[in-house]
Image (cartoon, rainbow, N blue to C red):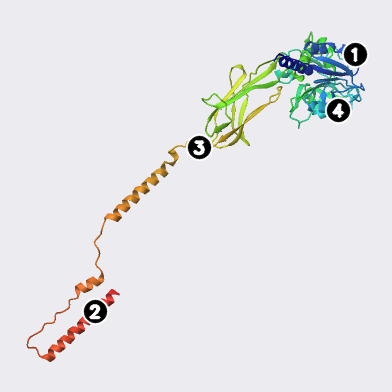
Amino acid sequence: MKISLILGVIACFSLALAEQETLVLVDNLNIRETHSQFFKSLQDRGYSLTYKLADDPNLVLSKYGEYLYKNLIVFAPSVLEFGGQIDTEAITKFIDDGGNLLMAGNAAAGDVYREIASECGFEMDEESAAVIDHFNYDASDDGEHTRIVVSPKNLISSPTIVGTQNTQPLLFEGTGLILDKDNSLVLPILTADSTAYSYNPKSQVKEYPHAVGRKTVLIAALQARNNARIVFSGSLFFFSDEAFNSGVAKVHGDKVSSAQSGNKALAVRLSEWSFGERGRLRVRNVNHNRQGDKQSSNTYTITDTVVYRIEIEELKNGKWQPFDANDVQLEFVRIDPFIRTTLKKKPNGVYEAIFKVPDVWGVYQFKVDYDRIGYTRLYHSTQVSVRPLQHTQYERFIPSAYPYYVSAFSMMVGVFLFSFVFLYYKEDSPKTKSDDVFTSVTVPRVKCVVGMDPSRRQRTQTKATAEEQALDQIAREVST
């Protein structure tokens, strides 16, 4: 038992160390000195930095199918080609496998930078092009107006990425970026003012600049669908000690001035976000059951009332804490969502929804898909079956069928009354025409008169016989 516990602790510790391993690629090792404050902030947070020249022939990101580093920093804008086993394809695969990338360039950045930027959804300006602003440049500018002063109001509205206390102006000196409109994953972290544009400062403007106004992006970011994060800055100067320690004095306009720039605070925030220290979410627990029951079920009946609970945590200051939001939604899906409802926030990061199962049986899924700017995508699904009612669960009488019930019973009563009348009521039989004929015709009696002449008697009998035959003929005709 103790051995397994020790092995578990060692495994967790090794995993934590692996997440802190960071490879830093530089043009020359002097960058360790000129950007020492930024690197020190990483080391103070527990990162293990490995410095390598960008063209080192022994560069590798992985060995035996396992990545040696979780994070990659590229501060080598002048590199023409990476050394060793690192190239654009290797860096792209590193991102696809969940690695994080922080990259900074300048106006001298070569084609390698542009290829990587293009793969990530950014487009860099031509070589030697820099962001120029004739109305918002710093007093320390060398006359080309390329060291510009950027207001913190130009930052993206996402406290998870850039924080909430950005009040000091920022210094920027480098090239501009343009985001791919068709890529919904890219984010403009910092944009230039409306008076800025990107062009070669040593040549006259003869054609429309590559980037103009607020479309000129100074720092961009991307969070891939696998939650890998990329921060791409057009200025290596932005992360330097000089930019961190310099005061800000805007020459024109509203005369903005500050004893120290806000570069350091923003750079630290960006590194925290890009390396997964901020904005990470996870599902700790999921439970669903019928209302009134305590045990979870994999099968529900149509029209059941279901209670769904999910516990979400956020990584803050190195610790998992209850997540606080009011826009987490649940979908009950069978091909298409039958129910979509907002989860109610409960204490300790628990979110709850109570709803009635649709009156359609089938295979459903509880789906929580939370995708917000700055946060890792949170997706969780649970499959359940919804069956129809059993024969003992149906109602004896359905209110909507009352008219049919009345119709059936009224038909039964009608048949009973009809049968009773038909069986027990007798009418007088009507007289036929033959009966009327026989009643109306009276056969004359033949009287025998004593002493009647025999010849006369014979004639009388013959006449009576003829009359009887005539009556019989009439009766036969009437009967037929």
**In the rendered structure, which disc, 3 or 4, sits on the residue that comes first in sequence?**
4
Q: Which residue appears at 69% of the width and 21% of the height? A: 281
Residue at image coords 48%, 38%: 391
Tell which circle, 3 or 1, labels the residue nearer the N-terminal end: 1
Report the residue marked by disc 4: 88
- Mark 4–mark 1 Cα distance, whole angstroms, equals 24 Å
For label 3, the SS is loop
In the image, residue 51 lies at what x, y percent? 87, 16
Question: Along the line of sight, which residue is nearer the eye, 198 or 274?
Answer: 274
Residue placed under numbered mark 2 in the picture:
472
Q: Which of the two residues, 72 or 17, is positioned nearer the viewer here?
A: 17
Residue 216 showing in the rendered view: yes
Viewport quadrant of the C terminus: bottom left
Q: Amino acid at mark 3?
A: Gln
Q: Which residue is mark 3?
A: 390
Q: Position of residue 443 (x, y in %)?
A: 17, 78
